Image (tube, rainbow, N blue to C red):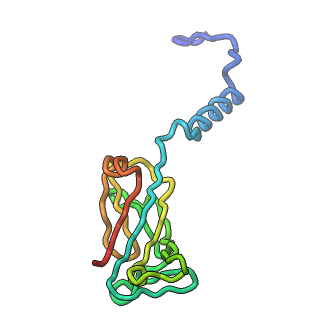
Amino acid sequence: MTRGFRQHAALPWRGPRAIAGVVVVLVSLGCNPQLLPPARAIAGVLILDQGTPVERGGGDCRGTGGYADLRSGVEVVARDDSGIRLSTAQLVAAPAATTADGTVPAAERERCVFRFALNDIPDRPAYRITIGERGGLRYTREELAAAGWTVELSLGR
């Protein structure tokens, strides 16, 4: 027997298999989605009411003039306050409202409505949502929770 140490009988929980078992347990706990903070989703609507006719065709809608950058496929980004990109989506044009005979009312000829869904957003105190190259709008977690995790943005008149 060495001085200061006592020799123990071989214990079944020691050895490579025991270490591998501990690693498996730790990894599975780390991958358990119920142990992670809940991910959020933000549903959004962007209403472009530009006051002049928009371009429509093939189910799409596109702004004109100073709003020509707004169309289906434009990137929507959610970031936290430190600028880290949390989620991305794309604008999708909603179909134009029509009358019973299928015509588009005059007001709808100057308006595009886009939808987007930012999914799997980690929990943060605040979020900044940007559309394309336009500036972002900041929302706190409390503001979004009170609004049911939906935002409605508008541009134009």
Front residue of this view, candidates 142 and 109: 109
Q: Is residue 97 left or right of residue 138?
A: right
Q: Position of residue 51 (x, y in %)?
A: 32, 84
Which image quarter holds the C terminus? bottom left
Q: Position of residue 111 (x, y in %)?
A: 40, 79
Q: Position of residue 143 (x, y in %)?
A: 31, 51
Image quadrant of residue 5? top right
Q: Position of residue 78 (x, y in %)?
A: 41, 61
Number of numbered discs visible in the structure rendering: 0
Q: Is residue 149 above or below residue 133?
A: above
Which image quarter holds the N terminus? top right
Q: Is residue 132 above or below residue 3?
A: below
Q: Is residue 7 left or right of residue 47?
A: right
The residue under the point 58% across, 34% down is 29
Farthest residue to the front: give it: 100
Q: Is residue 32 above or below residue 81?
A: above
The residue under the point 41% across, 47% down is 123
Front residue of this view, candidates 53 and 86: 53
